Amino acid sequence: MNPLTRHFLPSQVRGVYRFDDTFGKLTDENYAQYVSNKLRFLPRSIEKIFTDCFNLTENFTDARKQLYLDGQFTGNSYINRYKDFFKRYPYFKNGLDNKYDGADNYLEIEFVKKILTRLLNDAGMDCVQPQKTIGRYYADFAIESGTSKVVIEIDGFGKFKLRSNLDEFIERQNFIACEGWKVIRFTYGQVMTTTESSLRKLYDFLNSDPNFQPLLTTTKSQANLWEEPTQQTSTSAINVADLVNGFYSIQDWFVDHVIFCNDACDSIILRDDFGYQIPIVVLAINSLYEFLDSVATLVEIDFDLPTVTINGAPLPRGYQIEWHPALTISQKTAPKLTISINSRSVQNCSVSVPTPVRSEDAIFYRTGLSIQDVRQNLNYIVREVFGYSETKPFQDKVLKRLFDGEDTLGISATGSGKSFCFWLPSLLKPGLTIVIAPLRSLMRDQRLTLFNNGIASMEFINSDVKAPEQRRFLEEAKLGYIRLLYISPERLRIKKSGSLQFSS
Protein backbone atom coordinates (compact mmCIF):
# COMPACT_ATOMS: atom_id res chain seq x y z
CA MET A 1 0.00 0.00 0.00
CA ASN A 2 1.25 3.47 -0.88
CA PRO A 3 2.45 5.30 2.33
CA LEU A 4 0.75 8.45 0.99
CA THR A 5 -2.56 6.70 1.70
CA ARG A 6 -2.33 8.22 5.19
CA HIS A 7 -3.05 11.63 3.65
CA PHE A 8 -6.40 10.37 2.39
CA LEU A 9 -7.72 8.51 5.41
CA PRO A 10 -11.41 9.49 5.72
CA SER A 11 -10.90 10.13 9.45
CA GLN A 12 -8.38 12.85 8.60
CA VAL A 13 -10.18 14.22 5.55
CA ARG A 14 -13.41 14.66 7.49
CA GLY A 15 -11.98 15.57 10.90
CA VAL A 16 -13.80 12.72 12.63
CA TYR A 17 -11.88 12.87 15.92
CA ARG A 18 -11.49 16.64 15.88
CA PHE A 19 -15.27 17.07 15.98
CA ASP A 20 -15.37 15.87 19.60
CA ASP A 21 -13.04 18.72 20.59
CA THR A 22 -14.93 21.39 18.70
CA PHE A 23 -18.55 20.59 19.56
CA GLY A 24 -18.28 22.05 23.04
CA LYS A 25 -19.29 20.81 26.47
CA LEU A 26 -22.00 18.18 26.31
CA THR A 27 -25.17 18.58 28.34
CA ASP A 28 -28.44 16.67 28.49
CA GLU A 29 -29.97 19.37 26.31
CA ASN A 30 -27.45 19.29 23.45
CA TYR A 31 -26.45 15.64 23.51
CA ALA A 32 -29.13 14.61 21.01
CA GLN A 33 -27.77 17.24 18.60
CA TYR A 34 -24.25 15.92 19.18
CA VAL A 35 -25.39 12.38 18.36
CA SER A 36 -27.15 13.56 15.20
CA ASN A 37 -24.03 15.41 14.03
CA LYS A 38 -21.65 12.61 15.00
CA LEU A 39 -23.63 9.99 13.10
CA ARG A 40 -23.33 12.13 9.97
CA PHE A 41 -19.63 11.23 9.91
CA LEU A 42 -20.67 7.73 8.87
CA PRO A 43 -21.24 7.12 5.14
CA ARG A 44 -24.91 7.78 4.43
CA SER A 45 -25.61 4.21 3.26
CA ILE A 46 -24.23 2.84 6.53
CA GLU A 47 -25.73 5.38 8.94
CA LYS A 48 -29.18 3.74 8.89
CA ILE A 49 -27.70 0.27 9.53
CA PHE A 50 -25.99 1.58 12.66
CA THR A 51 -28.94 3.59 13.98
CA ASP A 52 -31.32 0.64 13.49
CA CYS A 53 -29.10 -2.18 14.74
CA PHE A 54 -27.80 -0.28 17.78
CA ASN A 55 -31.13 1.39 18.63
CA LEU A 56 -29.58 4.83 18.41
CA THR A 57 -32.94 6.59 18.12
CA GLU A 58 -33.82 6.02 21.80
CA ASN A 59 -33.44 8.46 24.68
CA PHE A 60 -29.83 9.64 24.90
CA THR A 61 -29.57 10.62 28.58
CA ASP A 62 -28.09 7.30 29.74
CA ALA A 63 -25.80 7.09 26.73
CA ARG A 64 -24.43 10.57 27.37
CA LYS A 65 -23.29 9.55 30.83
CA GLN A 66 -21.09 6.85 29.30
CA LEU A 67 -18.82 9.56 27.88
CA TYR A 68 -17.57 10.22 31.38
CA LEU A 69 -16.07 8.19 34.19
CA ASP A 70 -18.35 7.15 37.03
CA GLY A 71 -17.50 9.11 40.15
CA GLN A 72 -16.63 12.76 40.52
CA PHE A 73 -13.06 12.45 41.91
CA THR A 74 -14.13 14.28 45.08
CA GLY A 75 -11.78 15.28 47.88
CA ASN A 76 -8.36 16.90 47.88
CA SER A 77 -6.17 13.82 47.48
CA TYR A 78 -5.49 14.56 43.81
CA ILE A 79 -4.37 18.10 44.73
CA ASN A 80 -1.78 16.65 47.10
CA ARG A 81 -0.67 14.26 44.37
CA TYR A 82 0.05 16.96 41.81
CA LYS A 83 1.77 19.18 44.40
CA ASP A 84 4.02 16.30 45.44
CA PHE A 85 4.68 15.51 41.78
CA PHE A 86 5.65 19.10 40.98
CA LYS A 87 7.98 19.23 44.02
CA ARG A 88 9.68 16.04 42.91
CA TYR A 89 10.66 17.28 39.45
CA PRO A 90 12.42 20.64 38.86
CA TYR A 91 10.86 20.78 35.38
CA PHE A 92 7.49 21.37 37.04
CA LYS A 93 8.62 23.73 39.81
CA ASN A 94 6.64 26.60 38.27
CA GLY A 95 3.46 24.54 38.57
CA LEU A 96 3.29 25.23 42.30
CA ASP A 97 2.72 28.97 42.09
CA ASN A 98 -0.27 28.97 39.67
CA LYS A 99 1.49 31.65 37.58
CA TYR A 100 2.60 29.47 34.69
CA ASP A 101 0.22 30.78 32.01
CA GLY A 102 2.29 31.28 28.87
CA ALA A 103 5.14 29.04 30.05
CA ASP A 104 6.52 26.40 27.71
CA ASN A 105 5.28 23.63 29.99
CA TYR A 106 1.85 25.20 30.57
CA LEU A 107 -0.14 22.44 28.84
CA GLU A 108 1.85 19.66 30.50
CA ILE A 109 1.14 21.20 33.94
CA GLU A 110 -2.56 21.37 33.12
CA PHE A 111 -2.50 17.75 31.94
CA VAL A 112 -0.99 16.65 35.27
CA LYS A 113 -3.56 18.64 37.27
CA LYS A 114 -6.67 17.93 35.18
CA ILE A 115 -6.06 14.32 34.16
CA LEU A 116 -3.06 12.40 35.53
CA THR A 117 -3.48 13.07 39.24
CA ARG A 118 -7.24 12.59 39.07
CA LEU A 119 -6.86 9.27 37.28
CA LEU A 120 -3.80 7.75 38.98
CA ASN A 121 -3.35 6.89 42.65
CA ASP A 122 -0.14 7.57 44.61
CA ALA A 123 1.52 4.42 43.28
CA GLY A 124 0.48 5.38 39.77
CA MET A 125 2.02 8.84 40.03
CA ASP A 126 5.24 7.23 41.28
CA CYS A 127 5.37 5.35 37.97
CA VAL A 128 5.05 8.52 35.87
CA GLN A 129 8.36 9.69 34.38
CA PRO A 130 8.20 13.21 32.88
CA GLN A 131 10.67 14.14 30.14
CA LYS A 132 11.66 10.49 29.75
CA THR A 133 14.74 9.97 27.56
CA ILE A 134 14.13 7.44 24.80
CA GLY A 135 17.14 7.34 22.51
CA ARG A 136 17.87 10.94 21.59
CA TYR A 137 14.28 12.02 22.21
CA TYR A 138 12.39 13.30 25.26
CA ALA A 139 8.87 11.98 25.84
CA ASP A 140 6.44 14.26 27.72
CA PHE A 141 5.33 11.48 30.08
CA ALA A 142 6.21 7.79 30.30
CA ILE A 143 4.51 5.18 32.48
CA GLU A 144 6.01 1.74 33.07
CA SER A 145 4.45 -1.06 35.07
CA GLY A 146 5.62 -4.65 34.77
CA THR A 147 6.16 -5.40 31.10
CA SER A 148 3.78 -2.64 29.97
CA LYS A 149 4.94 0.82 28.97
CA VAL A 150 3.21 3.79 27.42
CA VAL A 151 4.29 7.25 26.32
CA ILE A 152 1.80 10.13 26.63
CA GLU A 153 2.48 13.11 24.38
CA ILE A 154 0.85 16.54 24.72
CA ASP A 155 0.53 18.58 21.51
CA GLY A 156 0.76 22.27 22.34
CA PHE A 157 0.67 25.34 20.15
CA GLY A 158 4.36 25.88 19.48
CA LYS A 159 5.44 22.36 18.66
CA PHE A 160 5.31 22.58 14.88
CA LYS A 161 6.41 26.06 13.86
CA LEU A 162 8.12 24.87 10.66
CA ARG A 163 7.25 22.19 8.16
CA SER A 164 10.59 20.49 8.99
CA ASN A 165 9.32 20.06 12.57
CA LEU A 166 6.69 17.68 11.21
CA ASP A 167 9.33 15.50 9.53
CA GLU A 168 11.23 15.35 12.82
CA PHE A 169 7.99 14.50 14.62
CA ILE A 170 7.27 11.51 12.39
CA GLU A 171 10.80 10.17 12.82
CA ARG A 172 10.48 10.61 16.59
CA GLN A 173 7.09 8.92 16.71
CA ASN A 174 8.31 5.92 14.72
CA PHE A 175 11.47 5.55 16.82
CA ILE A 176 9.57 5.54 20.12
CA ALA A 177 7.09 2.98 18.77
CA CYS A 178 9.91 0.75 17.50
CA GLU A 179 11.44 0.82 21.00
CA GLY A 180 8.33 -0.99 22.25
CA TRP A 181 6.37 1.96 23.66
CA LYS A 182 2.69 2.48 22.96
CA VAL A 183 1.99 6.14 22.24
CA ILE A 184 -1.14 8.13 23.19
CA ARG A 185 -1.49 11.77 22.15
CA PHE A 186 -3.66 14.53 23.59
CA THR A 187 -4.26 17.89 21.92
CA TYR A 188 -4.80 21.28 23.55
CA GLY A 189 -8.55 20.94 23.07
CA GLN A 190 -8.66 17.47 24.63
CA VAL A 191 -6.82 18.65 27.74
CA MET A 192 -8.51 22.02 28.22
CA THR A 193 -11.96 21.66 26.62
CA THR A 194 -13.07 18.00 26.62
CA THR A 195 -11.24 17.01 29.80
CA GLU A 196 -13.79 14.46 30.99
CA SER A 197 -13.79 12.48 27.76
CA SER A 198 -9.97 12.58 27.78
CA LEU A 199 -10.02 11.15 31.30
CA ARG A 200 -12.22 8.38 30.00
CA LYS A 201 -9.99 7.74 26.99
CA LEU A 202 -6.87 7.30 29.12
CA TYR A 203 -8.83 5.30 31.69
CA ASP A 204 -10.07 2.88 29.03
CA PHE A 205 -6.51 2.34 27.82
CA LEU A 206 -4.96 1.80 31.25
CA ASN A 207 -7.84 -0.32 32.53
CA SER A 208 -7.48 -2.68 29.55
CA ASP A 209 -3.97 -3.68 30.74
CA PRO A 210 -3.66 -5.74 33.97
CA ASN A 211 -0.26 -4.14 34.65
CA PHE A 212 -1.76 -0.66 34.70
CA GLN A 213 -5.01 -1.43 36.54
CA PRO A 214 -3.52 -1.19 40.09
CA LEU A 215 -2.34 2.36 39.28
CA LEU A 216 -5.87 3.74 38.85
CA THR A 217 -7.83 5.66 41.48
CA THR A 218 -10.88 3.61 40.51
CA THR A 219 -11.26 0.28 38.77
CA LYS A 220 -15.03 0.42 38.40
CA SER A 221 -16.07 -1.18 35.14
CA GLN A 222 -17.06 1.24 32.39
CA ALA A 223 -19.73 0.69 29.74
CA ASN A 224 -17.70 0.89 26.54
CA LEU A 225 -18.69 -0.25 23.09
CA TRP A 226 -15.15 -1.48 22.45
CA GLU A 227 -14.89 -3.72 25.51
CA GLU A 228 -15.54 -7.46 25.48
CA PRO A 229 -18.08 -8.39 22.78
CA THR A 230 -21.68 -8.58 23.95
CA GLN A 231 -24.97 -8.46 22.13
CA GLN A 232 -25.74 -4.76 22.29
CA THR A 233 -29.45 -3.94 22.27
CA SER A 234 -29.86 -0.86 24.46
CA THR A 235 -28.78 2.72 23.97
CA SER A 236 -27.58 2.78 27.58
CA ALA A 237 -24.76 0.42 26.55
CA ILE A 238 -23.79 2.46 23.50
CA ASN A 239 -21.44 5.39 23.33
CA VAL A 240 -22.00 7.01 19.94
CA ALA A 241 -18.57 8.66 19.99
CA ASP A 242 -16.95 5.26 20.44
CA LEU A 243 -19.14 3.76 17.75
CA VAL A 244 -18.28 6.30 15.05
CA ASN A 245 -14.65 6.82 16.08
CA GLY A 246 -14.20 3.06 16.28
CA PHE A 247 -15.52 2.63 12.74
CA TYR A 248 -12.78 4.95 11.49
CA SER A 249 -10.16 3.52 13.85
CA ILE A 250 -10.61 0.21 12.05
CA GLN A 251 -9.69 1.94 8.79
CA ASP A 252 -6.73 3.72 10.40
CA TRP A 253 -5.49 0.49 11.97
CA PHE A 254 -5.78 -1.38 8.68
CA VAL A 255 -3.83 1.22 6.68
CA ASP A 256 -1.14 1.54 9.35
CA HIS A 257 -0.85 -2.25 9.59
CA VAL A 258 -0.39 -2.73 5.86
CA ILE A 259 2.08 0.17 5.52
CA PHE A 260 4.05 -0.53 8.69
CA CYS A 261 4.37 -4.25 8.03
CA ASN A 262 5.45 -3.51 4.46
CA ASP A 263 3.36 -6.49 3.47
CA ALA A 264 4.54 -7.63 0.08
CA CYS A 265 1.70 -10.09 -0.38
CA ASP A 266 -1.30 -9.03 -2.40
CA SER A 267 -3.86 -10.65 -0.10
CA ILE A 268 -4.74 -10.28 3.60
CA ILE A 269 -7.09 -12.39 5.72
CA LEU A 270 -8.83 -10.71 8.67
CA ARG A 271 -11.18 -12.05 11.32
CA ASP A 272 -13.80 -9.73 12.82
CA ASP A 273 -13.65 -10.48 16.56
CA PHE A 274 -15.81 -7.60 17.77
CA GLY A 275 -18.77 -9.93 18.20
CA TYR A 276 -21.46 -7.48 17.10
CA GLN A 277 -24.61 -8.13 15.15
CA ILE A 278 -23.27 -6.21 12.16
CA PRO A 279 -20.03 -6.90 10.23
CA ILE A 280 -18.34 -3.70 11.37
CA VAL A 281 -14.88 -4.58 9.99
CA VAL A 282 -16.26 -5.35 6.54
CA LEU A 283 -18.32 -2.17 6.49
CA ALA A 284 -15.35 -0.04 7.57
CA ILE A 285 -12.85 -1.42 5.07
CA ASN A 286 -15.41 -1.52 2.26
CA SER A 287 -16.14 2.16 2.88
CA LEU A 288 -12.40 2.94 2.97
CA TYR A 289 -11.79 1.20 -0.36
CA GLU A 290 -14.71 2.94 -2.07
CA PHE A 291 -13.56 6.33 -0.78
CA LEU A 292 -9.98 5.74 -1.98
CA ASP A 293 -11.22 4.51 -5.36
CA SER A 294 -13.19 7.74 -5.81
CA VAL A 295 -10.14 9.83 -4.86
CA ALA A 296 -7.85 7.89 -7.20
CA THR A 297 -10.04 8.74 -10.20
CA LEU A 298 -9.55 12.47 -9.54
CA VAL A 299 -6.07 12.66 -8.02
CA GLU A 300 -2.83 11.31 -9.49
CA ILE A 301 -2.14 8.56 -6.97
CA ASP A 302 -2.16 4.77 -6.96
CA PHE A 303 -3.10 3.42 -3.54
CA ASP A 304 -2.08 -0.16 -4.45
CA LEU A 305 -4.86 -1.71 -2.36
CA PRO A 306 -4.44 -5.36 -1.39
CA THR A 307 -7.27 -7.85 -1.69
CA VAL A 308 -8.86 -8.68 1.66
CA THR A 309 -10.82 -11.67 2.91
CA ILE A 310 -12.79 -10.93 6.08
CA ASN A 311 -14.30 -13.60 8.28
CA GLY A 312 -17.21 -12.29 10.33
CA ALA A 313 -20.94 -11.85 10.79
CA PRO A 314 -23.18 -11.43 7.74
CA LEU A 315 -25.08 -8.23 6.99
CA PRO A 316 -28.45 -8.22 8.81
CA ARG A 317 -31.47 -9.08 6.68
CA GLY A 318 -33.16 -6.21 4.95
CA TYR A 319 -29.98 -4.26 4.22
CA GLN A 320 -28.00 -4.26 1.02
CA ILE A 321 -24.45 -3.04 0.42
CA GLU A 322 -22.50 -3.28 -2.82
CA TRP A 323 -19.20 -4.82 -1.77
CA HIS A 324 -15.92 -3.64 -3.26
CA PRO A 325 -14.45 -6.19 -5.73
CA ALA A 326 -11.21 -6.41 -3.70
CA LEU A 327 -13.17 -7.68 -0.65
CA THR A 328 -14.36 -11.20 0.04
CA ILE A 329 -16.73 -11.92 2.95
CA SER A 330 -16.65 -15.38 4.48
CA GLN A 331 -18.41 -17.08 7.39
CA LYS A 332 -16.21 -20.18 7.21
CA THR A 333 -13.67 -21.04 9.89
CA ALA A 334 -10.68 -18.76 9.33
CA PRO A 335 -7.16 -20.18 8.81
CA LYS A 336 -4.64 -20.00 11.67
CA LEU A 337 -2.66 -17.25 9.95
CA THR A 338 -5.69 -14.97 9.94
CA ILE A 339 -5.16 -11.56 11.59
CA SER A 340 -7.68 -10.94 14.36
CA ILE A 341 -9.05 -7.40 14.60
CA ASN A 342 -10.87 -6.49 17.81
CA SER A 343 -11.14 -3.80 20.48
CA ARG A 344 -7.52 -4.25 21.59
CA SER A 345 -6.33 -3.87 18.00
CA VAL A 346 -7.93 -0.50 17.33
CA GLN A 347 -8.36 1.27 20.68
CA ASN A 348 -4.82 2.63 20.65
CA CYS A 349 -4.73 3.41 16.94
CA SER A 350 -5.35 7.08 16.32
CA VAL A 351 -3.65 8.91 13.48
CA SER A 352 -3.27 12.13 15.44
CA VAL A 353 -0.90 13.96 13.10
CA PRO A 354 -1.00 13.46 9.32
CA THR A 355 2.28 12.68 7.59
CA PRO A 356 3.65 15.98 6.18
CA VAL A 357 3.52 16.44 2.43
CA ARG A 358 7.08 16.72 1.13
CA SER A 359 7.95 18.46 -2.13
CA GLU A 360 9.03 15.15 -3.66
CA ASP A 361 5.62 13.69 -2.73
CA ALA A 362 3.61 16.41 -4.47
CA ILE A 363 0.13 15.19 -5.35
CA PHE A 364 -1.79 16.67 -8.27
CA TYR A 365 -5.31 16.50 -9.65
CA ARG A 366 -5.83 14.45 -12.79
CA THR A 367 -6.16 16.76 -15.79
CA GLY A 368 -8.02 16.22 -19.02
CA LEU A 369 -11.13 14.73 -17.43
CA SER A 370 -14.37 15.37 -19.25
CA ILE A 371 -17.34 16.90 -17.43
CA GLN A 372 -18.96 13.49 -17.48
CA ASP A 373 -15.83 11.95 -15.92
CA VAL A 374 -15.88 14.52 -13.13
CA ARG A 375 -19.55 13.91 -12.42
CA GLN A 376 -19.19 10.12 -12.44
CA ASN A 377 -15.99 10.02 -10.37
CA LEU A 378 -17.47 12.25 -7.69
CA ASN A 379 -20.58 10.12 -7.29
CA TYR A 380 -19.43 8.24 -4.18
CA ILE A 381 -18.28 11.32 -2.25
CA VAL A 382 -21.28 13.40 -3.32
CA ARG A 383 -23.70 10.66 -2.26
CA GLU A 384 -22.02 9.19 0.85
CA VAL A 385 -20.50 12.33 2.37
CA PHE A 386 -22.94 15.09 1.42
CA GLY A 387 -26.07 13.06 0.82
CA TYR A 388 -26.77 14.57 -2.61
CA SER A 389 -27.94 12.48 -5.52
CA GLU A 390 -25.62 14.20 -8.01
CA THR A 391 -23.77 17.41 -8.79
CA LYS A 392 -25.33 20.26 -10.74
CA PRO A 393 -24.23 21.20 -14.29
CA PHE A 394 -22.87 24.53 -13.02
CA GLN A 395 -20.77 22.72 -10.41
CA ASP A 396 -19.46 20.22 -12.96
CA LYS A 397 -18.12 23.02 -15.16
CA VAL A 398 -16.37 24.78 -12.28
CA LEU A 399 -14.93 21.56 -10.86
CA LYS A 400 -13.58 20.48 -14.25
CA ARG A 401 -11.63 23.74 -14.54
CA LEU A 402 -10.31 23.40 -11.00
CA PHE A 403 -9.15 19.84 -11.60
CA ASP A 404 -7.45 21.04 -14.81
CA GLY A 405 -5.53 23.59 -12.73
CA GLU A 406 -7.10 26.64 -14.36
CA ASP A 407 -7.92 29.93 -12.63
CA THR A 408 -11.69 29.98 -12.26
CA LEU A 409 -14.29 32.66 -11.64
CA GLY A 410 -17.71 31.21 -10.85
CA ILE A 411 -20.77 33.45 -10.66
CA SER A 412 -24.10 31.95 -9.72
CA ALA A 413 -27.24 32.68 -7.74
CA THR A 414 -27.41 32.42 -3.97
CA GLY A 415 -28.09 28.84 -2.90
CA SER A 416 -26.96 27.32 -6.20
CA GLY A 417 -24.08 25.40 -4.59
CA LYS A 418 -21.02 27.60 -5.14
CA SER A 419 -19.44 26.56 -1.84
CA PHE A 420 -19.55 22.93 -2.91
CA CYS A 421 -17.12 23.83 -5.72
CA PHE A 422 -14.29 24.57 -3.29
CA TRP A 423 -15.32 22.16 -0.54
CA LEU A 424 -14.71 19.14 -2.72
CA PRO A 425 -11.23 20.05 -4.06
CA SER A 426 -10.09 21.05 -0.56
CA LEU A 427 -11.03 17.62 0.81
CA LEU A 428 -9.66 15.59 -2.08
CA LYS A 429 -6.02 16.71 -1.86
CA PRO A 430 -3.72 17.16 1.18
CA GLY A 431 -2.92 20.72 2.14
CA LEU A 432 -4.79 23.83 3.21
CA THR A 433 -7.45 25.72 1.28
CA ILE A 434 -7.94 29.32 2.43
CA VAL A 435 -11.36 30.86 1.80
CA ILE A 436 -11.64 34.66 1.91
CA ALA A 437 -15.08 35.45 3.30
CA PRO A 438 -16.21 39.01 4.15
CA LEU A 439 -19.16 38.11 6.40
CA ARG A 440 -18.89 36.57 9.87
CA SER A 441 -22.41 35.19 9.59
CA LEU A 442 -21.42 33.41 6.36
CA MET A 443 -18.46 31.77 8.11
CA ARG A 444 -20.67 30.51 10.93
CA ASP A 445 -23.27 29.20 8.50
CA GLN A 446 -20.63 27.39 6.44
CA ARG A 447 -19.14 25.79 9.55
CA LEU A 448 -22.57 24.61 10.68
CA THR A 449 -23.41 23.24 7.24
CA LEU A 450 -20.17 21.27 7.09
CA PHE A 451 -20.73 19.94 10.63
CA ASN A 452 -24.18 18.78 9.54
CA ASN A 453 -22.53 16.90 6.68
CA GLY A 454 -20.00 15.19 8.92
CA ILE A 455 -16.99 17.42 8.18
CA ALA A 456 -15.03 19.03 11.02
CA SER A 457 -11.73 19.66 9.20
CA MET A 458 -12.57 23.35 8.81
CA GLU A 459 -12.50 26.49 10.93
CA PHE A 460 -12.79 30.25 10.60
CA ILE A 461 -10.80 33.12 12.08
CA ASN A 462 -12.37 36.52 12.59
CA SER A 463 -12.78 39.09 15.37
CA ASP A 464 -15.27 36.82 17.17
CA VAL A 465 -12.58 34.18 17.75
CA LYS A 466 -10.46 34.74 20.86
CA ALA A 467 -6.67 34.88 20.56
CA PRO A 468 -5.96 31.43 22.15
CA GLU A 469 -8.40 29.79 19.75
CA GLN A 470 -6.86 31.61 16.80
CA ARG A 471 -3.45 30.25 17.79
CA ARG A 472 -4.92 26.78 18.12
CA PHE A 473 -6.55 26.91 14.67
CA LEU A 474 -3.36 28.15 13.01
CA GLU A 475 -1.33 25.36 14.58
CA GLU A 476 -3.95 22.79 13.59
CA ALA A 477 -3.81 24.12 10.03
CA LYS A 478 -0.04 23.62 9.99
CA LEU A 479 -0.44 20.11 11.36
CA GLY A 480 -3.05 19.13 8.80
CA TYR A 481 -6.04 18.79 11.11
CA ILE A 482 -7.70 21.66 9.24
CA ARG A 483 -8.03 21.52 5.45
CA LEU A 484 -10.38 24.45 4.99
CA LEU A 485 -9.79 27.78 6.75
CA TYR A 486 -12.09 30.80 6.37
CA ILE A 487 -10.45 34.19 6.91
CA SER A 488 -11.80 37.72 6.53
CA PRO A 489 -10.10 39.97 3.93
CA GLU A 490 -8.72 42.44 6.48
CA ARG A 491 -7.17 39.67 8.58
CA LEU A 492 -4.79 38.79 5.76
CA ARG A 493 -3.18 42.21 6.28
CA ILE A 494 -2.45 41.62 9.98
CA LYS A 495 1.19 40.76 10.66
CA LYS A 496 1.96 39.26 14.03
CA SER A 497 3.66 36.31 15.67
CA GLY A 498 1.92 33.05 14.97
CA SER A 499 0.62 34.04 11.54
CA LEU A 500 0.06 31.24 9.08
CA GLN A 501 3.43 30.68 7.42
CA PHE A 502 4.93 27.51 6.05
CA SER A 503 8.51 26.56 5.42
CA SER A 504 9.14 24.77 2.17
Image: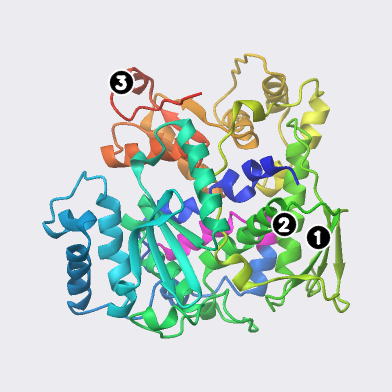
Q: Quadrant of residue 21?
A: bottom left
Name the quadrant containing residue 234: bottom right
> Would you say residue 45 sits in the magenta stretch?
yes
Give x and y (percent) for residue 261: 71, 55
x 41%, y 75%: residue: 65
- Distance, label 1 to label 3, CA atoms, is 51 Å
- Name the residue carrying label 2: 45
* Amino acid at circle 1: Ile
Q: Is residue 482 visible?
A: no
Magenta span dominant secondary structure: helix
| 474 is within the stretch colored magenta | no
Q: Position of residue 320 (x, y in %)?
A: 82, 63
Q: Nearer the viewer, residue 77 or 56?
A: 77
SS at circle 2: helix
Q: Would you call the spot at circle 3 few (<14 residues within 10 Å), some (14-19), or many (20 or more)?
A: few
Q: Are marks 2 and 1 in contact (CB under 8 Å)?
A: yes
Location of residue 312 in the rendering, given as x and y in whole percent from the top left corner: 79, 73
Q: Which percent across, then down, holds residue 451?
A: 51, 47
Q: Which portion, as a residue range, is magenta?
A: 30-47
Q: Is residue 281 above or below residue 122?
A: above
- Could you tell me the amino acid type at mark 3? Ile
Circles 1 and 3 in contact, beta carbons < 8 Å? no
Give the residue drawn at x 76%, y 64%.
282
Q: Amino acid at mark 2?
A: Ser
Q: Is residue 253 positioned above or below 440 on the image? A: below
Which numbered disc, 2 or 3, marks the residue closer to the eye?
3
Give the Cα separation between the discs numbered 2 and 3. 45 Å
